[in-house]
């Protein structure tokens, strides 16, 4: 990842983000509803993945060194802001609405994603010192 972040980190993030935004513009009646809490789980997983990819992108970028020193703080606040804007955006999609519980699911998933990346980077750093 460190040797070619564009290929392994940035490009997958851009592709995923476009996919995620595209999915949030689909009217609710076009989406299959399989079980009751499906919506909250989808939000949780979507933002878990987004936060992991974004944290790695911030960690490996070199244009703003200060950001690389605090990728989790930058990513957390970016997730909170983006999730809030996404919920507002969904209020304008037929059959969708702005939901505080969706926002909470987004933030919870994003937070877990950050914890996973933090653990991953610590393991990689430990392996590099051996």
Image (cartoon, grey):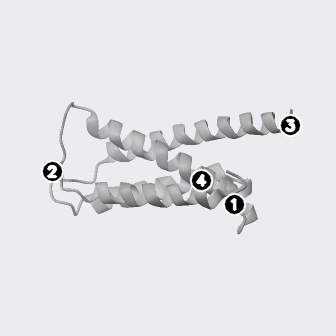
| Residue indicated by mark 4 | 8
- Compare residues 61 and 93 and report the one nearer the observer: 61
Residue depth check, mark 1 versus mark 2: number of the one nearer the observer: 2
Around disc 3, counting alpha carbons within 10 Å, would you say few (fewer than 14), some (14 to 19), or many (20 or more)? few
Q: CA distance from mark 4 to mark 2?
A: 32 Å
| Number of the label disc, if any, that sits on residue 30 | 2
Is residue 118 shown above or below 65?
above
Name the spot of residue 13 as percent of width and height, x first.
51, 56
Residue beneath the point at 67% across and 50% down: 1
**Is residue 47 found left or right of 129 in the rendered image?**
left
Around disc 4, counting alpha carbons within 10 Å, would you say few (fewer than 14), some (14 to 19), or many (20 or more)? some
The single residue placed furthest to the right in the displayed view is 130
Residue beneath the point at 41% across and 54% down: 83
| Residue indicated by mark 3 | 129
Name the spot of residue 129 as percent of width and height, x first.
86, 37
| Residue indicated by mark 1 | 67
Q: Tell me if label 4 and label 2 are in contact, CB under 8 Å.
A: no
The quadrant of the rendering that contains the C terminus is top right
Residue 22 occupies which quadrant of the picture? bottom left
Q: Earlier in the sequence, mark 4 or mark 2?
A: 4
Residue depth check, mark 4 versus mark 3: number of the one nearer the observer: 4
Q: The residue tagged with tag 4: helix, strand or loop?
A: helix
Name the spot of residue 30 as percent of width and height, x first.
15, 50
Residue beneath the point at 53% across and 37% down: 112
Q: The residue tagged with tag 1: helix, strand or loop?
A: helix
- Compare residues 122 and 5 and report the one nearer the observer: 5
Q: The residue tagged with tag 3: helix, strand or loop?
A: helix
Q: Earlier in the sequence, mark 4 or mark 1?
A: 4
Is residue 43 shown above or below 65?
above
Residue depth check, mark 4 versus mark 1: number of the one nearer the observer: 4
Q: CA distance from mark 3 to mark 1?
A: 23 Å
Q: Earlier in the sequence, mark 4 or mark 3?
A: 4
């Amino acid at each position: 990842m460190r040797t070619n972040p564009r290929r392994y980190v940035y490009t997958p993030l851009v592709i995923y983000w476009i996919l995620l935004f595209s999915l949030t513009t689909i009217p609710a009646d076009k989406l299959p509803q399989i079980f009751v809490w499906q919506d909250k789980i989808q939000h949780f997983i979507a933002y878990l993945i987004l936060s992991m990819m974004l944290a790695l992108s911030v960690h490996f970028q070199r244009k703003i060194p200060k950001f690389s020193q605090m990728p989790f703080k930058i990513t957390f606040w970016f997730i909170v802001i983006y999730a809030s804007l996404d919920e507002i955006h969904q209020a304008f999609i037929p059959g969708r609405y702005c939901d505080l519980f969706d926002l909470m699911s987004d933030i919870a998933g994003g937070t877990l994603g950050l914890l996973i990346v933090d653990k991953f980077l610590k393991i990689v750093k430990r392996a590099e010192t051996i």
